[in-house]
Every structure is written in C-alpha cells, then in structure tokens.
C-alpha cells in the first residue's frame, strides 16, 4: 500500500532553571487541548532553528535563543480537517529562555505551563515526545 512521506514540523523545546531545577514549557493544542511543544510548519525564508524560536514566541510568548542544531526528532500525527491525520516528522530545537511576555499572537488560545521534566513526561500522551524529555534529563 502506498504511504505518503511524513511532513516536517519544527518544534521548540524551551527550558529554564528555576530554584535549581530544570523546567520545560508545554502548551495545549488548540483543538484537542493535549499537552505539546510549540511547533509549526517550516518557514522557508528562515533556518529551522529560527523557525523554532518564532513558534516559541507566537504560541507561548517565549523570547530566547534557539540552538542551531536539532536536539532530537520524533514521529507524530497532526489532526487534519474532517478527522484525517497527517504523519509528521518533528525536528526539536532547544530554546534557552531569556524572557517571557504575555503579549504574543496566540495569547489566550492555549494554556501555557512550565513543568519539571518528570511532569512533562507524565503529561504528554506521545511516547516519542516523552523520549525527547528523557534525553534532556540525561
């Protein structure tokens, strides 16, 4: 059977230190309200790491520096119209957070939460994304 190749998405893994503990940022998807990373389709006029920084700002109000090399990747599915699911390959870039603002394009459309890596693993329903958090922990 013919299978379409996975579409590429770019994700931002925003991290910070707080009270000596490492935290990561999760947001809810707009439709299903699942806990996910900020992510989107590549912006052709930017390098992938820059796209990750843009997604972090637009979806969560994070201002930071994206690492140039991907930290990890994982397979996922994006819900399409009429219930169709699109297979995606997600490239994950680390974002070193410099500041956070409440003035961003998707403010109020998603929940934004900073959590420990262990809590992020519990909140995600994608085992492949949980592996990305485990990699950050090691």
Image (cartoon, rainbow, N blue to C red):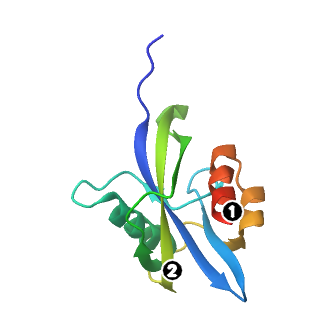
* Furthest residue toward bottom: 19
Looking at the picture, does residue 122 appear above or below residue 86? below
Instruction: Give residue 87's position: percent from left, percent from top.
Output: 49, 34
Can residue 104 be seen by looking at this rendering?
no
* Quarter location, residue 63: bottom left
**Rendered-image quadrant of the C terminus:** bottom right
User: Of residues 5 and 58, which is closer to you in this image?
Assistant: 5
Q: Residue at x 71, y 62 (%)?
A: 120
Real-space CA distance between mark 1 and mark 2, rounded to the nearest whole angstrom: 20 Å
User: Of residues 122 and 106, which is closer to you in this image?
Assistant: 122
Query: Does residue 129 appear to the left or right of 4 in the view shown?
Result: right
Looking at the picture, does residue 128 appear above or below residue 6? below
* Furthest residue toward top: 1
Query: Does residue 69 appear to the left or right of 36 in the view shown?
Result: left
Can residue 92 be seen by looking at this rendering?
yes
Instruction: Give residue 93's position: percent from left, percent from top.
Output: 46, 61
Label 2 crowd (10 A; few <14 / some 14-19 / many >=20) = many
Disc on res. 38: none
* Furthest residue toward front: 138
Query: Does residue 40 appear to the left or right of 135 in the view shown?
Result: left
Asked which secondary structure carries label 1, the reply is loop
List the residue tagged with mark 2.
Answer: 97
Instruction: Give residue 43's position: percent from left, percent from top.
Output: 29, 56
Instruction: Give residue 97's position: percent from left, percent from top.
Output: 51, 80
Query: Does residue 121 appear to the left or right of 76 in the view shown?
Result: right
Disc 1, disc 2: CB below 8 Å? no
Q: Earlier in the sequence, mark 1 or mark 2?
A: 2
Tell which tag, 1 or 2, sits nearer the viewer: 1
Q: Residue at x 44, y 34 (%)?
A: 6
Disc on res. 138: 1
Label 1 crowd (10 A; few <14 / some 14-19 / many >=20) = few
Asked which secondary structure carries label 2, the reply is strand
């Amino acid at each position: 059977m013919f299978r379409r190749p996975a579409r590429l998405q770019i994700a931002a893994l925003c991290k910070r230190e707080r009270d000596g503990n490492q935290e990561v940022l999760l947001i809810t998807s707009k439709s299903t309200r699942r806990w996910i990373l900020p992510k989107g389709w590549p912006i052709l006029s930017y390098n992938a790491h820059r796209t990750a920084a843009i997604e972090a700002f637009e979806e969560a109000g994070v201002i930071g520096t994206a690492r140039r090399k991907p930290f990890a990747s994982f397979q996922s599915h994006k819900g399409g119209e009429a219930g169709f699911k699109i297979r995606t390959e997600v490239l994950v870039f680390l974002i070193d957070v410099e500041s956070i603002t409440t003035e961003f394009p998707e403010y109020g459309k998603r929940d934004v939460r900073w959590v420990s890596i262990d809590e992020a693993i519990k909140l995600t329903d994608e085992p492949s994304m949980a592996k990305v958090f485990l990699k950050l922990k090691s």
